[in-house]
Amino acid sequence: MASSSLLRLRPPLQPPPPPPHSSSSILRNLHRIPSGYSPNKHILTLKPFLFVATNALTESSDSPKSLDPPDPKFLLQELADSFNLLPSDYFSQLPSDLRLDLNDAAFDLSNGPVMEQCGQELGMTLLNISRAWESADTSTSKALVNDLPSLVNSLTSNNKSALGKRLTSAGRRFQSMGQYGQGELQRISKAMISAGKLLSSTPVSEETKEESKGKTRMFKFGELQVELTREKAYIGAAIGFVYGIISWELSQGIQNIPDGTFQYANENAALIAQSLRGTLLVLFYGSTVLSAFATFGLLFLSRELKSGRK
């Protein structure tokens, strides 16, 4: 009985209390976090690196300098493809007003000293394209335009700039034609202007700029191409002045003929003679006026050419 009472009075055994911070130490050991680790401190330390990386990504994605410009050969090939889609008789089927715009585009493409600015091979190609447009020859235009992508690699920077300006000017002529057919003309104008703007942005040397300022103007009428110089302007003014004097003297001589100088067989002959006399007077007086305008115009042109060279 005594032993049983002693067993009742003895308190139950309890496990020893855990050491302080045991849970945190277990977590540290489980995750292998070093002692003295401060999350806020490391976040503040990483902020400058995150800021630099974000700015670098933003500049690389937003800066246009990181994008390479398109290849001129690729844009010229797009222009050739737009011509290849045309039917063989497309230009010949254009209305008369659009044919005039096509002739203007041909003039802008090959106007002036095309050989000197674009080189011998490219200049001849542009002249042939211009003639094909003027004669509404679509097949020849296709073949010649398809030669442009292969020629661009052999061009100098000055040749590319001159070609770009000519393509841009001719492309605006196509753009002014408006919507016709299935939009072929607008597709050509878009490709031509895109290639022209890219090529015209090619930097040109200062020497070439000075040479282009000193070059003379060219006058083109159909296949006739005449160089305009001061000397030729003076010669033309002198010829116009002499022709005006001759016309004036002839008109005065016809007008001073008395009416009774000639005898006519009948009244019909007299009427015909009077009518012929009036026609000659109008012709020679008109020639005198036109000669005067031509003389003053050529003198003004020679003055402009002189000031342009200065």
Image (tube, grey):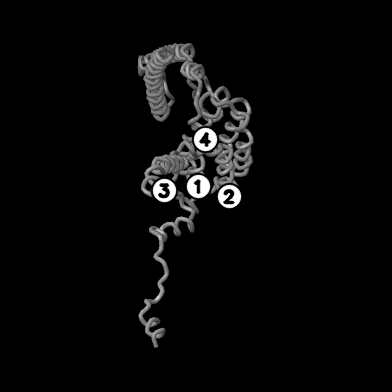
Q: Amino acid at mark 3?
A: Tyr
Residue labelled with disc 4: 106
Between disc 3 and disc 2, the foreground one is 3
Mark 1 and mark 3 residues within 8 Å of each other at the beta carbon:
no
Q: Find the residue positioned furthest to the front.
A: 2
Sequence order check: which comes first, mark 4 or mark 2? 2
User: For the residue carrying disc 1, how many other residues have a C-alpha within 10 Å: few (<14), some (14-19), or many (20+)?
Assistant: some
Q: Nearer the viewer, residue 154 or 135?
A: 154
Residue at x 38% of width, y 16% of height: 300
Labels 2 & 1 near each other (Cβ < 8 A): yes
- Specify which label sits upstream in the sequence, 2 or 1: 2
Q: Is residue 59 above or below residue 160?
A: below
**Of pointers 4 and 3, the one earlier in the residue sequence:** 3
Q: Quadrant of residue 294?
A: top left
**Mark 3, residue position:** 37
Front residue of 80/51: it is 51
Residue 261 in sight here? no
Q: Tell me which amino acid carries mark 2.
A: Leu
Secondary structure type for disc 2? loop
Q: Mark 2 sits on what residue?
A: 85
User: Secondary structure beneath disc 4?
Assistant: helix
